[in-house]
Image (cartoon, grey):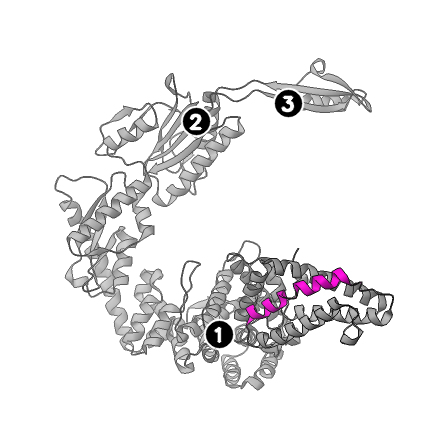
Amino acid sequence: MADLLIELFSEEIPARMQPRARDDLKKLVTEGLVQAGLTYASAGAFSTPRRLTLSVEGLTAESRPVREERKGPSTTAPQQAIDGFLRSTGLTLDQLERRADKKGETFYAVVEKPGRAAADIVAEVLETTIRTFPWPKSMRWGAGTLRWVRPLQGILCLLSDETGAHVVPLTVDGIEAGNTTEGHRFMGNGRFTVSGFDDYVVKLKRARVVLDTAEREAAIWQAAQNLAFAAGMEVVPDAGLLNEVAGLVEWPVPLMGRIADAFLSLPPEVLQTSMKEHQKFFSVRNPKTGRIEGFVTVANIEAPDGGATILKGNQKVLAARLSDAKFFWENDLRVAKAGMGEWVEGLKSVTFQAKLGSQADRIARIAALAREIAPLVGANADDAEQAAKIAKLDLRSAMVGEFPELQGVMGRYYALEAGEKPAVADAARDHWRPRGESDGVPTEPVSVAVALADKIDTLTGFWAIDEKPTGSKDPFALRRAALGVIRLVLGSLYRSGLLPVLDKAEAKNIFATLKLRESQKQELLEELSGVTDEMSHSKIGEIRRTATSMSRVMIDAKSGANGANVAVSAEVLDLLSFFHDRLKVFLKDQGIRHDIIDACLAMPGNDDLTLLVKRAEALAAVMKTEDGANLLQGFKRANNILSQAEAKDGVEYSFGADLKFAETDEERALFAALDKAEATITPAMKAEDFATAMAAMAALRQPIDAFFTAVQVNSDNQVVRRNRLNLLHRIRAVCSGVADLNRIEG
């Protein structure tokens, strides 16, 4: 067994590329070694700004010999076929074996490949890895053809075994592999020889290089906390920044500085974002005041003056950056205190989407929709409408123009300065959420109403212009928007179906696609916003008929939430199906099988997502029990027998089974069990107590099993047969009232 050490030494590798580069180096080399016939015990990849390193332990000394047999054509086959077989094997005719089989005599090729030394395989694999390394961006330099993220300067490649460490012979574009490397660019002590991984790590540390990224992260965080604690403050955690900074330094030396008093009045988010984005500083907070008052920077050198000169330079640059931020802040406050009218006008000239109008048009749609959604989530309708009108105004602010990641955060500050209610201001900040899977959802009713209106308008708008996600492509992040709606609905008081809201939102978006004068569009929009629930669908129909250029097929009597009939377009139904697909992904991550979800989707009211999830969770819990699994088999047996009989007889057996025709105790017991189950399931379903309803359904398992064990359904007595088939219908009806069990696998 041998140990392999590889180091690829170059100019600085961008920090954002290092994690993937480590994984790629390990994957490409180890897979290449295994494919060539070597095995290994373990492998680990490491990186610093100037090196990628791979350590492989327990590598076999050589690959195993391979003996391969290949069956060829018959000995009587045409010469052309035999010649083709010879070319594919690389053998001559006299090297083939002739073997008898049932059809005569056949040629066989026996190819024996001797084992290869590990050094030869490593050289071959490493050269291929270097030449084909999948950097996101790479460059070519000098006269060579090699592309690397930055100029590659050295290759260290050692195989160590009981006889010592041996350099693997390898040359790539004039760079010859060796057994030497160098440490820190400024604090190192020149090139040095290494004999293996342990020796390599120790000597690197002596040369002021910490090889392990996790070790550098731990050192940075511990030192930063110690510096802050000594000053009576605390470091604001930022895992992403910590990982990035660890990729910028080989020998981390944290230093702490103070923010000038002139900038302490800036919002903490502004200070934190400016320092992070421009200078990779950690923010330091004063726990007594809650303000960001300091910073921690991480140097890559131990300075003779303890870092005073480094801090002085950093503070000078920071002051310039924060001066810009202060200018933006003060200029934005002037606009906010004046009512933000300047930004309102500005958004009229900002196009949201060519076919869907400007940002101002979109805000008008969102505001109208937020007003309609507000009562459904327990929000004040006036507050929701006002919040939607001002929620996106910060997009025109100078601060968000400089730091787009502060959209919403700054909107809240500006809304408060404009005199808006706290709930309205909070909605300006929170309506963007959730921005991703790890982001939380707003819980305040006004914020929920605006967030739902925002995302639903986006979805219905792009559906209206037929810009739907296709395959893996989703340029407008519509899948994320749909998942956001799902999480908002499930986390709020929203209990109405989606269909009516989607329908109205779609109608509003059609305005943006109509070729009408602005005055006509405004009149139609005002009419739509003012109609009552009873009139809304007929008015929407009129609007669609006005859009003569648009092909819209209305589907009447679609069963929505609470069994209400909703006339909707095919596009709205398609969008609801899109929500269901996203819900499947969401619930699958929570351990609920797709067939369980399908069984619940088949029930009425499937546009009420909260109802749908409660039903799916209860059904999933029952199906995990022995009674649930056995009941499923009994139900399917009953359904199969009943379906076959109905198809054969040409009638539907749903006219009510009569207890007086029961001939066995098992039949009578099943009658009683079904009566008891119905008495429990019916009120439970009305109360949406699906757990109780499912438990009552699962309790039917034993009487159904006993019935099928003791009774022959297709009796010779036609009266008894019909009665038993009607009894099977009762089983199907009782179980199907909870979920469509036909869709459950197994």
Task: Look at the picture and state if 692 lies above or below 518.
Answer: above
Whether residue 38 appears in magenta in the rendering, the answer is no
Q: Quadrant of the N terminus?
A: top left
The CA span between labels 3 and 1 is 66 Å
User: Against 702, is 188 above or below?
Assistant: above
Tell me whether circle 3 and circle 1 mark residues in contact (CB < 8 Å).
no
First of labels 3, 2 by sequence position: 2
Q: Is residue 178 above or below residue 559?
A: above
Secondary structure at badge 3 equals strand
Look at the image and give the residue range highlighted in magenta.
688-713
User: Amino acid under label 3?
Assistant: Glu
- Could you say whether the residue bearing mark 2 is in a helix, strand or loop? strand
Disc 1 to disc 2, how far (Cα)?
A: 59 Å
How many neighbours does mark 1 have within 10 angstroms: few (below 14), some (14-19), or many (20 or more)? many
Residue receiving disc 3: 68
Mark on residue 58?
2
The magenta stretch spans residue 696: yes
Q: Is residue 118 left or right of residue 158?
A: right
Nearer-the-camera pick, 654 or 204 = 654
Q: Residues within 10 Å of mark 3 (few under 14, many from 20)?
A: few
Q: Quadrant of residue 252?
A: top left
Residue 148 appears at what percent x and percent y? Answer: 40, 35
Tell me where residue 721 appears, x and y as whole percent.
82, 68
